[in-house]
């Protein structure tokens, strides 16, 4: 199954973590993120991928601050027949 890709419509905070530290980062509007784990329609955190980094973001923030799923082939001109 392909990863779901969404485009952020506003700047949105995410959490970056390593073994010892947590850091809050702000992803810019228009950023394209891949959902790699979790349910965007659920509660709690969703694991996302942005610029080769794995981050955590609240599912609610991702739902409210992103545009439609751009990984859907209907979004690409050459996929329409």
Image (tube, rainbow, N blue to C red):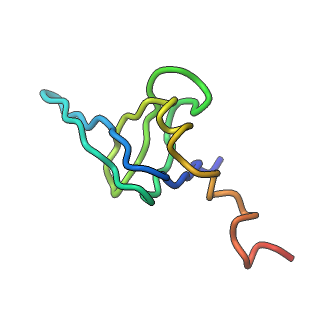
Q: Is residue 30 above or below residue 23?
A: below
How many labels, in total?
0
Tell me if 59 is positioned left or right of 76 in this view: left
Spot the residue most to the left. Answer: 20
* Residue under the image location 46 percent in, 57 percent down: 32
Residue depicted at 47% across the width and 34% down the height = 61
Q: Is 5 on the left-hand or right-hand side of 52?
A: right
Residue 65 percent location from the top left of the image = 50, 43
Q: Please provide percent x and percent y for residue 37.
A: 50, 35
Is 72 situated above or below 80?
A: above
Quadrant of residue 76 in the image? bottom right
Q: Position of residue 20 (x, y in %)?
A: 12, 27
Q: Is residue 20 left or right of residue 46?
A: left
Residue at figure coordinates x 50%, y 38% from the top left: 62
Q: Point out the residue furthest to the right here.
A: 81
Q: Position of residue 13 (x, y in %)?
A: 33, 39
Task: From the viewer's perspective, tell me whether residue 57 is left or right of residue 70.
Answer: left
Q: Residue furthest top?
A: 43
Nearer to me, 15 or 11: 11
Judging depth in this view, the residue of 15 and 67 nearest the camera is 67
- Quarter-of-image position of residue 78: bottom right
- Quarter of the picture holding the C terminus: bottom right
């Amino acid at each position: 199954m392909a990863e779901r890709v969404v485009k952020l419509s506003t700047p949105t905070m995410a959490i970056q973590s390593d073994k010892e530290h947590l850091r809050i980062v702000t992803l810019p509007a228009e950023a394209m993120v891949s959902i790699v784990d979790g349910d965007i329609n659920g509660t709690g955190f969703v694991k996302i991928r942005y610029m080769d980094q794995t981050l955590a973001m609240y599912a609610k923030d991702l739902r409210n601050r992103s545009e439609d799923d751009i990984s859907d082939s209907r979004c690409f001109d050459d996929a329409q027949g």
